[in-house]
Amino acid sequence: MLSSQRLGDVMSNLLNIVNEVQNRIRHNNLVNWYPPTTKVVNNFTYYARDLYPRVVEFWKAGLTHNYRMFDGANQSGKTSGAGYEVACHVTGLYPPDWPGKKLIGPSKWWVAGETNSDVKEIMQDRFIGPVDDYGTGLIPYKCLDFTSMTNTEKADTFIRTIRVKHFDQDGNQDGMSVVTFKSYKESRKSFQGLPRNIWLDEEPPLEILSECMARTTADESFMLIITFTPLQGWSPMLSNWLPGGWQTSGPIKINGEPSTSKYLVIQTVDDVPHITEKKKAVMYENYHPHVRDARLKGIPSLGSGAIYPIPKTEWTIVDREIPKHFRKLYGLDVGYNWTAAVWFAINPETGEAWIYSSYQKGETEPIGHAEVIRSRGLWIPGAIDSAANGRGQDGGESLINQYRALGLIVSNADKSVEAGIYSVWTGLRSGMIKVFASQIELITEIENYHRDEKGKIVKANDHRADALRYAWMTKQIARQEKPPGAVGRIDPRFQNQFGR
C-alpha cells in the first residue's frame, strides 16, 4: 500500500501529465480545425470539414485562381476558413488531405483589416491567441518566434510583425515566414513595396485594393485573398471586383467570360453547421432590414455611400444626333418645391438608351413645366410620379389630369424604388444607359446620389435621379414620332396661353 507521501507524489505527477497534455492540445490548435469527423476539444465543437463546403471550395479555388474573394454572412466562419489556410502556408503544416494550393518554403504575408484594433482583436487573436495565452491560436506555439514579438505583455499591443517557423514536408524546419499586420487607416503608400501574399479581412478601400493587387502580380505563386461581409453595398471596390454585376459562387465573369485569375465564394448562414435554426431566427430579428441580406446571405446591403458607384467615364457619351427611328419618352418627378424631367431616346434594335435632355425648376405651376416639356416634343409620352394622382397644388383636380389637360401624354410610372435602383445600376454598368456629356446637372446628381449610414436614400438633390428611374422602369411606353396633331391635344381652356 502506498504511503500518503508516495500517493501525493503520484497524484502530482498525474496532474502534471494532464496539464502537459492539455497544454500540448491548446498549443497545437491548428490540428483541431476542420477535422475529418466532428470532435469536441476542451468543450468546443470542431465540425467536420465536409460540413463547410464553401470553405473547401474557397481553398480549392487557390489551385487555379490567384485572387479570391470570400463573401460571407456574419459569424459564418469566413475569417476562420481564410485564417486556417494562411496558418498552413506560413508554417508548412498542411493536413495530409489538404485540397488547396501549397506554397513551397517560407512565405511573406501582409494581413490587414479596417483598424489596428480590429486586426489585434480579430486576426492576431485568431493567429496567435490572446495576449495572456500566446500560442493557442491557429499558429502552433512551437512555430512562433517570440523574439520578433515585442511588448507582447501589454493588453493593448498591436504587434506589427511576427516571424513563424516553417517546416518542409518531412517535418524539418527550412526557414522563417514573416507576417506583417497592417490596417486600412494607414496611407495607400504604406501598401506599396515588394511582392508578397496578402490577406485582407473586411472590405478595403479601392485604392488599397489596387496597391495590393499590384503586389501580387510579379509571380503566379503569390495570392490575394479577401474575406468580408458586403455591408457597404455596391461600393467602388465591389464594382471593380465584379464588373459584370452580382453573381453566384465561381470564377468572376468579365465580359461574360469566366476569369482565370479571380474567384468569388459566397457563404450564407445556411451553409455552415455551427449556426443553429434558433440562432438564425435571433439574428434575423435583430439585424436591421437594410443589412439583413448582407449579414445573413452575403448579398450586398443597401448600405451607406454612393448608390451608383460607377465611374462616369463608363456611362457618359459625347452628344450626338438622335436617329429618327429611335423611340422617346421622359420621366417626370412632380412637386411644388421642385419638378424635374429626364428624356430618353431608345434604340429599338438594341435597347440602348441615351439620356439627351433634362430639366428642373421649382415653385412653378404645372402650366410652366408643361410649356417646357411640350417644347421637347408634344408627341413624346411621359412616365409621371404617381403622387400626381393626388390633389393638385391648388387643391383642385389631380396633377396628372392637369398635365393631361395641358396636352401631355402621361402615364403612371413604375415607382419601385429598390428594384428601380438596381435596374438603373445594371443599365449604367452594362452600357445600356448612356448620358450625353452636356447634361452636367444630371451627371452630378447621379454621382452624388447616396444613402446615409442607415441605408436610407438621402432625399436631397435627387429629383432628376427619380425622374430617370421612372422613365427607365416605364420605358415600354416609349414611341417614335407621330404626325403633328395625332397626339397631345390641348384642352381648349389652355389654347390661348400657349399662343394657339
Image (spheres, helix red, strand yellow):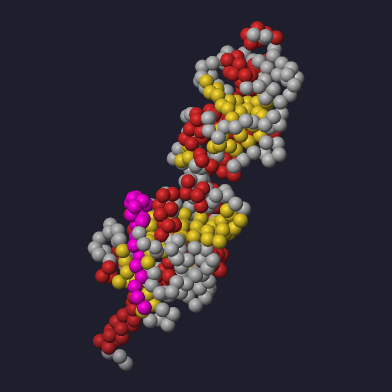
Residue at image position (52%, 20%) is 361
Q: Residue furthest top?
A: 496
Q: Is residue 301 visible?
A: yes
The residue range painted magenta reads 174-192
Q: Quadrant of the C terminus?
A: top right
Residue at image position (28%, 57%) is 156
In the rendered view, tell whether residue 287 sits above or below residue 21: above
Q: Indicate the position of residue 24 as horizontal and vertical percent values.
A: 36, 76
Q: Is residue 76 visible?
A: no
Q: Quadrant of residue 329?
A: top right
Q: Indicate the position of residue 293 as horizontal and vertical percent values.
A: 54, 48
Q: Quadrant of residue 487?
A: top right
- Image-based side of 23 in relation to 63, left or right: left
In the rendered view, tell whether residue 333 sits above or below residue 52: above
In the rendered view, tell whether residue 47 sits above or below residue 285: below
Residue toward you, 342 or 199: 342
Q: Residue furthest front?
A: 321
Residue 187 magenta-highlighted: yes
Counting the numbered discs, the total is: 0
In the rendered view, tell whether residue 482 sits above or below residue 5: above
Residue at image position (61%, 16%) is 371
Residue toward you, 327 or 97: 327
Q: Quadrant of residue 176?
A: bottom left
Residue 267 magenta-highlighted: no
Q: Indicate the position of residue 124 as horizontal and vertical percent values.
A: 35, 62
Residue toward you, 344 or 152: 344
Q: Indicate the position of residue 60 as horizontal and vertical percent values.
A: 54, 67
Q: Quadrant of the N terminus?
A: bottom left
